[in-house]
Amino acid sequence: MGFQLPITIAEAVKDIQAQNLVLPAIQREFVWEDSQIIRLFDSILRGYPIGSFLSWKIDSATADGFRFYGFIRHYHEKDNPHCPVLDLPKDKTVIAVLDGQQRLTALNIGLRGYFAPRLKGGWWNNHKAFPETRLYLNVLSEAEENELGMRYDFRMLRAPATQPQDGSAYWFPVSRLFEVEDIADLMAEVAEHDLGNNKDASKMLGDMWKSIHNAGTLYFYEETDQDVEKVLDIFIRVNSGGTTLSYSDLLLSIATAQWSNRDARDAIHTLVDDLNAAGQGFRFSKDVVLKSGLVLIGVGDIGFKVKNFNHANMASLEKQWDTVSEALGVAVGLLADFGLSDATMTADSVLVPVAYYIHRRGLTNAYRTKPATAEDRRRVRSWVMRSLVKQGVWGSGLDTLLRELRDVIDADGAEGFPLEQLESRMAGRGKALTFSAEEIEDLLDAKYGSKRTFAILALLFPHVDTRNIHHVDHVYPHSLLGTRKLKAANLDKAESNRIGTLRDLLPNLELLEGPENIGKSAAPPLAWAESTYSGDGFNAYLTRNELPGLPADVSEFVEWFGRRRDALALRLARVLGVAADEDESVVAE
């Protein structure tokens, strides 16, 4: 093993393009954010070293027993987050990257592709939430003072970048610095952009071009030993720093090597993508799928350990993959029916025991809708929601909890969901799904936007058909309780501050179907309800949502808030089984 002669960035990217540099199955996915990409390019333009790289030169005979993947060029968080599988010639000597994948992928994206992460707050199923951005450099000025410590103004922008009319910036596509192979041609192109007379812009682009094409700055330390165990040990050691290497990434690679009739990596990634596309969208990781696989096939020790991913266990997982996948699909569909999604799931691990119950009974998607299974679904829903609302259930001791829940389902779940037995076993593990009066108080202070809030409302109002999209909605609209509106209502400062404190808390929240919520807009609650519901419908709406009347205007909000808080406290106590004496203390406080 030793250092090779340094190569240029352009040479490395061309090697990626020609599939001369590839990724072994043990590598994880691309996980960098756009800020990390632009910091890398800032370092390059500043002449900073960007670290060495470790590669493994694999003889064709050794390479024949492995799967290899290409580097991502066009990253799309939803539609294209995975490295492409390569079909390499059998007689090809492979150079596989063991350390440096994230940096090389960032170079490949910045110089040849685009980056499309989900916008903050964007809906997973909304394609517009994933705009394609490409790397640009502002050649007219350096970066303003920033937290990233960047000197140069690199940004990921939608192409083609909009040039400011005031001439404060000029965004030059960094990809052109790779595509143009002669600096004279680059300078001619710079002149075409009316930048030829700007010495600073020309120098900046010239320096960046030289950093890509002329400077041999990438040092590869190449391992040639064909001992796979030794190389695996090297890989683990060198990947102990930087962006955290999930142990499941390594285990996934082992599963990939163990399966004989399927591509484990492709099968697991495809399943993860399918699960996450259910309902309003989830964000399950391959960790959850791998953990579920160990639980569902009955492995005794379900910890993420190399010994548990042995040939026998992986052969069993491959053999049962279709039924495991189906059970997970039904389970996620059921969670979506409960109204859950990435925005409302406080713990992804709740999926595992639900999937095991479905797998154990051989249930299909028909279970989700059949009238005969309605009561069983209600029991599952009650357990799921309370486990998501109760803090500390899905934290420490997870593997032990999952094994014990599996044991209970094996013993008592043959004909129906063993709700009482599961709760009894959980209580024995110090994870009881019982609630105290103090915890009721905490639930009543749940805030709009918190993942836990949906589950609390779903428990409070089990009549809501969450198979339809429901929004967590303010009873008294947030927009009518803003600072300007309160000031216009001539409320004193203390009263305004009090309202501002209360407006986003649980007593001012309800579940409304999406279209109904949109139609409600920002109307005062009493006026909206009276115009929406006529006759008995109005009273039914109040009863259904535990509303002690509705405030006609903001002056009645605080008093109404207190009355609904008391009403919800009593209902929560009944739903969660708080004792009668505690029940009274909730309201008294």
Image (cartoon, grey):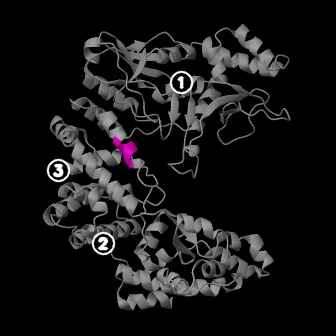
Taking the image as shown, residue 489 lies to the left or right of residue 411, namely right
Frontmost residue, 317 versus 545: 545
Residue type at mark 1: give it: Asn
Residue 290 horizontal/vertical position (percent): 29, 44
Give the residue at mark 2: 432
**Mark 3 or mark 1: which is in front?**
1
* Secondary structure category for the residue under label 2: loop
Tell me where the magenta segment starts and ends, as one range: 271-275
How crowded pointer 1 is (Cα within 10 Å; few <14, some 14-19, many 20+) is rated as many
Whether residue 404 is visible, yes or no, is yes
Residue type at mark 3: give it: Gly
Residue at 31% over, 37% down:
267
Give the residue at mark 1: 108
Give the residue at mark 3: 300
Q: Is residue 256 above or below residue 12?
A: below
Frontmost residue, 113 versus 103: 113
Which labelled disc corresponds to residue 334? none
